[in-house]
Amino acid sequence: MVIMLFVLSVFTGCSSTEKTASSDASKNESGNKPVQLKYWVPFSGGDGDFMKAMVAEFNKTNSDIQVEMLNLKWEEYYTKLRTAVASKQAPDVAVAHTSKLGELAPSNLIAELDQIAPNAGIEWDSFNQNILNATVFEGKHMAIPLDTHAMIMFYNKKILGDAGLLDGDGNPDFKPGADGFIDFLKQVKEKAPADVMPFVGTSNGNVPFWMWWSLYSQMDGKLLSEDGKKAAFNNEKGKEALQFISDLVHKDGLWPKNVKNGGEIFAAGKGAVNFNGVWSTGTFEKNQGLDFGVMTIPQLYDHEATWGDSHTLVLPVQKEDDPKRQEAAAVFANWLAENGAMWAKAGHVPSKTEVIESEEFKSLEYRSEYVEVVDQVNFMPNSDKLFPIGDILRANFDLVMNGQASVEEAINKAEKEVNDLLSK
């Protein structure tokens, strides 16, 4: 009995010690409890691991603020974010794409930041202005940019080198303009092994849409009218951009039909050129046997431009405003942007100029080869219907890619459907 009482007292003492330690750990160096923030992200891919590491580093180095991250599936993310705000259970800070701000800002789902920014140490002029401007609505800052992620060009150095299609610096050697690029791909087809695809990209969905917007943007094409109430892409420029893509498949046979995953084919060393997002950099560089290079999308028309979007940090509207929590959330968001070199490991280009110019960023292989996209990205216009507009264009461009419609038919059909959508 005495022994049992002794053992019980030992375990009770351990339990008491653990509770005290836990209680002490919940306080910062000043003896106060840190602000606890809820943070939502939609990173289903590998970049989720990079963001998890960033949050862990922030928590380790900031005793006054502690962040709990919740990673939600992309397909459900914005629906759940809207529901959370409506039910007064929103996270303190959340990732939002620039292309989604046109829905979130006018619906009063996110807080305006200009009153919060000064106390949080946010300096708007420290961000790349092209990225920042896309987050401003009616003169108000609605989001803190984290990055830009754009469509760029990957190329297989071995395939092009063996075909004699690299210049003295190891870059693809082709003449300017659309014709020069087509001629270059034709040479790849002629000189490379028969099982190599000159150009490879996923045939349906985002890739043709992003390519079209990139080429159309190089001709200063507009998606919508100035008032945002009408489609503005049914014109010679819009058709020319889509015809170029169609010809790669149907006329010149340079882009095979029905490619399910262009990135996988390129990673396997069976594609010479791949148009893809910057996030593919992190995937391709893990493949030890893949000798590849990277560059911005070639200028095929009037000037350099490409499709792109950005991850931003927003402060969802809460049940009751809490200035202390909002300031803490803005401090955390700004810290993520300031430590963008960590995020760049996922392939994204940081939003802050000083990060891009830092040795930490420059030491990362490949990233400096396409860093110019920060100024080349042509963000789509702010519209609360931008995502369904994109769905319409993707569906109609797929008809062209699959040989089910001509460029003229697809553009006409897309224009009608977009105008019907905007009239509602």
Image: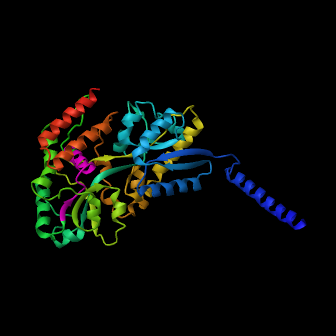
Residue at coordinates 32% horizontally, 34% vertically from top-left?
Answer: 385
Can the viewer see residue 385 in this picture?
Answer: yes
Q: In the rendering, at what x and y percent does residue 357 appear?
A: 39, 56
Q: Position of 187 compared to 151: left or right?
A: left
Q: Position of 65 compared to 146: left or right?
A: right
The quarter of the displayed image where residue 3 is located:
bottom right
Residue at coordinates 30% horizontally, 60% vertically from top-left?
Answer: 369
Q: Position of 136 compared to 8: left or right?
A: left
Can the viewer see residue 316 in this picture?
Answer: no
The quarter of the displayed image where residue 82 is located:
top left
In the image, which residues are magenta?
197-216
Question: In which quadrant will I find the C terminus?
Answer: top left
Front residue of 397/296: it is 397
Q: Which residue is outermost to the top?
A: 423
Q: Does the magenta-highlighted stretch encompass residue 141? A: no
Q: In the rendering, at what x and y percent does residue 52 appear?
A: 50, 55
Q: Does the magenta-highlighted stretch encompass residue 203? A: yes
Q: Position of 240 compared to 144: left or right?
A: left
Q: Which residue is outermost to the front?
A: 1
Front residue of 295/210: it is 210
Q: In the rendering, at what x and y percent does residue 335 appear?
A: 50, 49
